[in-house]
Image (cartoon, helix red, strand yellow):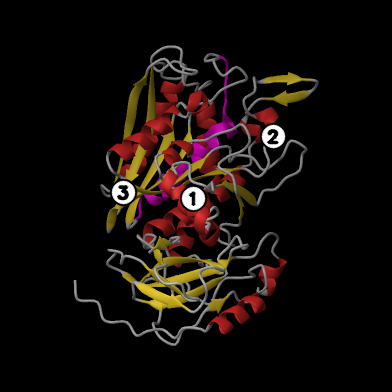
Amino acid sequence: MSSTPTPTPPIRPSRRTVLAATAAAGAVTVGPSAAPAASAPVMPTAELVDTPARPATAAEAERPGPRPPATAQAPSRELRALLKEIDPDRIEATVRKLVSFGTRHTLSTQDDPDRGIGAARDWILAEMRSYAAGSGGRMTAELQSYVQEPASRIPTATRITNVVATLRGSVTPERVYVVSGHYDSRVTDVMDATSDSPGADDDASGVAVAMELARVMAKRRPASTIVFAAVAGEEQGLYGAAHMASRFKAAGTDVQAMFTNDIVGASRADDGTKDPYTIRLFAEGVPTSETAEQAATRRSVGGENDSPSRQLARFVRDTGDNSATGMHVRVVYRRDRYRRGGDHIPFLEQGYAAARFTEPAEDFAHQHQDVRVEGGKQFGDLPEFCDFPFTARVARVNAAALWTLAQAPAAPRNARILTAALTNSTELTWARGSEPDLVGYEVVWRETTSPEWTHVIPVGNATSHEVDLSKDNVFFGVRAVNRAGLRGPVAFPLPQV
């Protein structure tokens, strides 16, 4: 590679200018910044000042829900074409096929060709291999099995098998992004392995999302590696996902993000109301894997709302909440719902950034229920209660985030705020990324009370930048930009003496 030219220092705003911009923008951001879209020329490196969010357009003002944050990214032409290929009819066919196996309980039969979790496993593998056949050798599909010895909800030694399709990246294959759903199902009694357990919404819908993304992306060349997984053992205790996460960790795999789609099949709540254009995204604040030293730093300088998983959730909002997906992403500041847990949790336990997609309001008569009619009301997790166009839009949100993550630069490593000297300005440093198409960086900031990044400062192809704004008053972040104009996730800087 040729040597990197010395960047021209950008013009820095004064504290007074920056604070005036904050007041003008208001407490809530109202639109994306003036940063170039994905198809725009590369970022300039001079005559740039702090950019608050622009006013909303008339169309955005009429759109329900929160306005786009300052860091929002318009989908590229490539991404729009990909999203259009996601097919609700294929998603419906996948859900109905999985339901046809009668039960997919983890403890059900594994050697019957037509019924039980083994039949579902073999069908998913065959489908994934059919997608891989058209990938030009970039995708592989395999079974990932182990024997779970007796444990909670596992009375006897049981083989648990994940179906894993891996689409290898062409530029930075060491970076890995994972999307999953769980293909096991259950009825009212979590130990009932023989009764019909259709599991259409929980979680054939999530498996259908992962499989549809595998089908659409297999024909493409992501820069980084994407893993599409259907895992087992979720209802018995997250066993399959825990095995997958531990294997990644043991191998030293650089899993930069993981999404699980669990209960993403319906848009109707238990009171009959519908919300077909919202998807919840659960993202933890304080990291599950936080050490005592990390906790001490967080208590000192803040960051409860700036964990890697929260930055991941913001990235999903930036890339997946727009007209191309037709969806609003409602980020929920929790690891999961009350008394519930999903397959992202084992990844959080291993120190990976992870989050969970779930429909906007659940109908509990149609999950974890015996199939029956009581008082004229149908119970059971049946396909007739699913909204397949809704699930296709959920798949588009996943696709927008995953594809942009795989194509954009990674979050900068070793982002730091220098604190050796007490000053009313802020000096940030970070390590230069290794991506061959990386062209520069942006510093982002927001008031400590704001949930979204409100300002963007392009800083050129540098590894440090000083902002004439007190680190005591606001939160800062750093993100990388590539030649195509794609922005990666934000890195939250830690103090460095």
- The percent coordinates of residue 421 (x first, y second) are 41, 72
Q: Are marks 2 and 1 in contact (CB under 8 Å)?
A: no
- The percent coordinates of residue 58 (x first, y second) are 69, 74
Question: Rounded to the nearest whole Å, what is the CA distance between mark 1 and mark 3?
Answer: 31 Å
At label 2, the amino acid type is Asp
| Residue at 64%, 40% in the rendered image | 266
| Element at label 1 | helix
Give the crowd class for mark 1: few <14, some 14-19, many >=20 residues within 10 Å. Answer: many
Please tell me which of labels 1 and 3 falls first in the chain.
3
| Residue at 44%, 15% in the rendered image | 109
Q: Quadrant of residue 149?
A: top left
Please tell me which of labels 2 and 3 falls first in the chain.
3
At label 3, the amino acid type is Ser
Question: Rounded to the nearest whole Å, what is the CA distance between mark 2 and mark 1?
Answer: 27 Å
Which of the two discs, 2 and 1, sits closer to the camera? 1
- Magenta stretch, main secondary structure class: helix
Give the crowd class for mark 2: few <14, some 14-19, many >=20 residues within 10 Å. Answer: some
- In the picture shown, does residue 378 fall above or below 94? above
At label 1, the amino acid type is Ser
Q: Which residue does the numbered mark 3 point to in the structure image?
A: 135
| Element at label 3 | loop
Q: Which residues are magenta?
A: 195-220
Q: Which residue does the numbered mark 2 point to in the structure image?
A: 363
> Residue farthest to the right?
375
Q: Which residue does the numbered mark 1 point to in the structure image?
A: 309
